[in-house]
Image: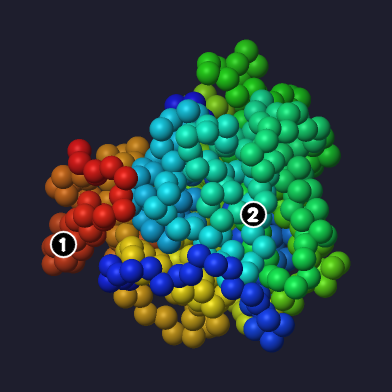
């Protein structure tokens, strides 16, 4: 929004080995189709399958029963733009220069030196599509910035950051670089419609990568009447969507969680439409589906006017969107891949959004570029139910709302530190997942070991030769 501040294998620097020429895919070597579905601000506890007692999310719950439910999956930071940059590049977002959310017209972008998952898959012969939120530059009409088509998406239908004026009848979508104007309907339905159209019109001789990036349940929200009616008992008065403006609108009012619940259920319904279409055209068995969120939720702990009526659940975890506590970074994640991922399983293996690129590249048979550090790791073993040993701890760098700038998770231990590395908190997540007891005073060897890891990782980011500007504070 307007003022909203919406692990690692270090590869040897060398000449890139990834060819810029698309590689044809033969029938006998056809890799899986990949559908990556990313919700906006969906909380760890916002799905029935993750413990919500009121929200009804049958499509995503069914998907969880058909695949793998990850219970320690993390966003790379607790905010939208840097999290999405990490998912697409495999790199902690401070390396890419995207440190926070990107306001309209800001001179920040995912720059020309970055290589995205879409680019890698296109070189492998994939059809690559984006439908939904981009938010990796200052705007889809900013000509000085790279757009989705410059980052590997052969077709794209996108909005910059959030739906304007809200989710109903949005007017800020672009299709392949051209503004579309007002579209009747609701954002999630419109994004799903576009994706289904591409599935129907696809080439049959090549796999596809669909990045389905919803704007829900990011504020300000609007949902169809039928979904609002499901949760009328939780709403005080009639739903009245607030327009996205530079000032609080005249109709700002807290009306209870019913409108938020309706928005999540509508998102679930639209995901279900896409999944049903995959089934109808016979693509379930050949398609890997991943669903996750870009960061933790806005809870009833509102910090800005546009967060009113957002009642996301972090599943009783501490913190919310914008925090390095678990509630800000731990998110739901579900993977279905018939014949490769056993159905009905759950895994508590700690994974991060920046693991997606190396994991999916390995599954698709794509070599990673060797001219840059890649922070993510190939976690395909976790999907198969095989042992997985991370080479380096999970790492976060983000200036959060509580004065912390760094976090690291190594097994059961999670350390948080400020930018001076002087104020620290240590939690044993195996015994204290809600981060209640600070163990820093009693576990000094652990603190010193993890502080040294944080300093090393931060120094690597500062020295990254591809970083567009210095980290200095």
Whole-percent x, y for residue 318 in the image:
41, 49
The image's mark for residue 154 is 2
Identify the residue shown where x is 64% and y is 59%: 128
Name the image quarter holding residue 179: top right
Vertical comparison of 369 with 181: above or below: below
Q: Is residue 369 left or right of residue 385?
A: left
* Residue 374 shows in this picture: yes
Can you name the residue that lies furthest to the front here? 21
Q: For the residue labelled by badge 2, is the local secondary structure a helix, a strand or a loop?
A: loop
Whole-percent x, y for residue 37 in the image:
63, 57
Q: Is residue 166 left or right of residue 366?
A: right
Q: Is residue 423 left or right of residue 359?
A: left
Q: What is the crowding at mark 2: few (fewer than 14 residues within 10 Å), some, or many (at least 20)?
A: some
The image's mark for residue 452 is 1
Identify the residue shown where x is 60% and y is 77%: 345
Vertical comparison of 373 with 342: above or below: above
């Amino acid at each position: 929004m307007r003022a909203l501040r919406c692990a690692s294998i270090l590869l040897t620097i060398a000449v890139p080995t990834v060819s810029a020429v698309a590689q044809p895919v033969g029938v006998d070597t056809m890799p899986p189709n990949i559908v990556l579905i990313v919700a906006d601000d969906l909380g760890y506890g916002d799905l029935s399958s993750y413990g919500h007692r009121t929200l009804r999310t049958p499509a995503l719950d069914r998907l969880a029963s058909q695949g793998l439910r990850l219970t320690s999956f993390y966003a790379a930071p607790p905010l939208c733009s840097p999290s999405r940059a990490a998912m697409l590049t495999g790199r902690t977002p401070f390396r890419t220069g995207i440190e926070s959310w990107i306001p309209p017209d800001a001179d920040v972008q995912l720059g020309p030196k970055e290589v995205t998952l879409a680019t890698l898959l296109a070189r492998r012969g994939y059809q690559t599509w984006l439908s939904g939120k981009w938010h990796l530059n200052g705007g889809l009409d900013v000509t000085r910035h790279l757009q989705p088509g410059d980052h590997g998406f052969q077709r794209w239908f996108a909005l910059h950051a959030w739906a304007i004026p809200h989710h109903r009848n949005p007017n800020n979508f672009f299709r392949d670089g051209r503004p579309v104007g007002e579209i009747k309907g609701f954002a999630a339905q419109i994004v799903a419609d576009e994706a289904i159209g591409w599935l129907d019109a696809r080439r049959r001789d090549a796999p596809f990568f669909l990045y389905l990036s919803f704007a829900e349940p990011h504020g300000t929200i609007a949902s169809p009447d039928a979904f609002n009616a499901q949760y009328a008992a939780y709403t005080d008065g009639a739903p009245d969507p607030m327009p996205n403006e530079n000032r609080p609108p005249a109709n700002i009012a807290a009306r209870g969680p019913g409108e938020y619940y309706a928005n999540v259920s509508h998102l679930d319904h639209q995901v279900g439409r896409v999944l049903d279409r995959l089934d109808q055209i016979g693509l379930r068995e050949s398609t890997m589906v991943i669903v996750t969120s870009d960061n933790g939720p806005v809870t009833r702990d509102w910090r800005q006017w546009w967060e009113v009526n957002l009642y996301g659940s972090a599943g009783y975890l501490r913190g919310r969107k914008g925090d390095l506590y678990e509630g800000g970074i731990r998110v739901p994640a579900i993977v279905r891949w018939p014949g490769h991922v056993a159905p009905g399983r759950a895994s508590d293996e700690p994974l991060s959004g920046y693991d997606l690129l190396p994991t999916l590249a390995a599954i698709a048979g794509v070599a990673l570029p060797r001219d840059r550090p890649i922070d993510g790791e190939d976690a395909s073993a976790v999907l198969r139910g095989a042992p997985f040993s991370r080479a380096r701890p999970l790492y976060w760098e983000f200036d959060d709302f509580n004065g912390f700038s760094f976090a690291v998770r190594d097994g059961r231990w999670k350390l948080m530190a400020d930018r001076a590395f002087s104020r620290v908190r240590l939690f044993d997540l195996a015994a204290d997942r809600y981060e209640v007891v600070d163990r820093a005073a009693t576990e000094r060897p652990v603190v010193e070991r993890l502080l040294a890891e944080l300093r090393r990782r931060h120094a690597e980011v500062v020295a990254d030769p591809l970083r567009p500007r210095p980290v200095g504070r």
